[in-house]
Image (tube, rainbow, N blue to C red):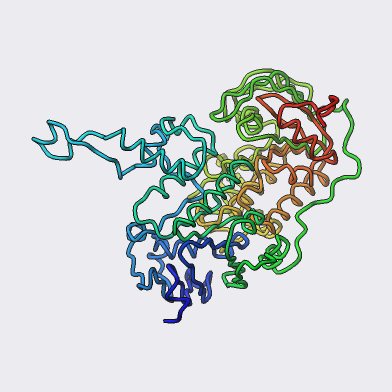
Amino acid sequence: MDTDANKSVLRFDNVSKSFFDNVVLKNISFSLEQGKILGLVGENGAGKSTLMKILFYMDDIRETGGYEGSIYLDGNKLEFSSPMDAINAGIGMVHQEFSLIPGFTATENILLNREYTKKSVISTVLGKKLSTLDRHKMNLSAREVIELLGVNLDPDMLVSDMPVGHKQFVEISREVNRENVKVLIFDEPTAVLTESEAQILLKALRRLADTGVAIIFISHRLQEIVDVCDSIMVLRDGELVKNVEKTQEGYSVSQLAKWMVGRDVDSRSSVREQALDNDEDIVMDIKNLWVNMAGEIVDDVNLSIRRGEFLGIGGLAGQGKLGIPNGIMGLAKAGGTVIYNGQPFSLNSPRAALDLRIAFVSEDRRGFGLLLDEPVYWNITFSAMQVLNKYLKRYVAVKLRNDKEMRQTAQKYIESLEIRCVSEKQKVRELSGGNQQKVCIARAFDLKPDLMFVSEPTRGIDIGAKSLVLQALKSYNEDNNVTIVMVSSELEELRSICDRIAIISEGKVAGILSSGEDSAKFGLLMAGLNPEKEGDL
């Protein structure tokens, strides 16, 4: 074994994987040293998730014939039979999707199945299964790991009461708190975090690495990869195309993007030279809207949406931007007055919104957006079949589903949105997060809406797919005169594509600016200040 191999805590040697005739990984070799952070990047479908599934020997790897090649931990060849073997060996992972118990506190989730107990009179007589929880010791343990991360998180707060960013830190705390952690994988940990929360996490990763933990950091936010990683590994179409150490000069985001997609990538879309300025043709008028949604504040939103425009909604996490579309679409209880096309609009009724040709792409694609165990073509066409009676054939008095037409329609969207799947019959659960998001957008397009609410459409999507999705939304807006309202946590993304941007602060519209305005004005609005007042700039 060579010198580098002796220093590595984790090493892959010529690891390959095929799902039947589909080769998804080809001869992947790399090593990770103790206390180092490796950035793993690649487009959705490049093989990142499969590589991590192999490391944990998850069910879909084991049940499809395993993998070729060898993996070593501390120089010992791994022969795991289940993910629990990997966890017991000191390998942990923070997944994109939360796996927390909502009715438990942060402490209870962090120490789940590793609770500290103390003896009682009953347990002394009847056995340790009747021991009581040592809540004081559990709280101390939870607080210690929370302090290590450097986040302001209440250990006694119920997960159900937390904003999404705090939930992510609870997930991270649980993995960091495990004993004998050698390798930690972070899969898109900042996707649901605000910029300030993301910076806290990046500093925490550095502190963790300094304690000797080896880290694999998967992110589509390439600037974070550049800022925090000691080395970067780039996958493209299942192959390792770059594995570079951080040099004194570093590496640029544009270099990473080009390595990922094999071409130059422009992350910005051109914006219309003149934003729509017709205040008379209002498609939706929102007055005094309040929404009861966990982690969001929406208590008095007043907003007029112009017909045919591309309106952005931005703001800090928890300030209300996500609550607005969820309230209007009936996914969270709402009140106030909404006028749509000059007529009163019924809140708290998802079907009423769909019947009016209003579509919604939710930020929670797995919770509200997808039928995970159904095929791609079914997910794309199902809503249009229900709402518009498309894809139905009449036989006498009976209507039957036209599967052929559904598959043909789905195939068109698969090609136009570059949805990476084996076929239109593949289950959506098996797709990467970014490709699942594209399926949600295709389904909204298939409804042929007059108005679309699109919430965090590029969350968890790589830079190449992000450009494609934004361009698809922009083209749909311009080619069909469809009004699109897009909610995003990334201000520059909104500025790259929207006509106007409404900033939400403390549950209200703090102000609306043209996308071409100075970024400092948007920052002032997010802070609750008026950029027009003298002294604010």
- The answer to whether residue 101 is visible is yes
Could you tell whether 411 is left or right of 181 in the image? right
- The answer to whether residue 393 is visible is no
Q: Residue at x 46, y 47 (%)?
A: 172
Compare residues 427 and 458 and report the one nearer the observer. Answer: 458
Q: Quadrant of the N terminus?
A: bottom left
Residue 28 to residue 296: above or below: below
Compare residues 213 and 184 and report the one nearer the observer. Answer: 213
Could you tell whether 54 is left or right of 255 in the image? left
Could you tell whether 93 is left or right of 354 in the image? left
Compare residues 100 and 353 and report the one nearer the observer. Answer: 100
Q: Residue at x 70, y 45 (%)?
A: 445
Q: Quadrant of the C terminus?
A: top right
Compare residues 179 and 221 and report the one nearer the observer. Answer: 179
Residue 83 to residue 162: above or below: below
Whole-percent x, y for residue 520 in the image: 79, 37
Res 5 → quadrant: bottom left
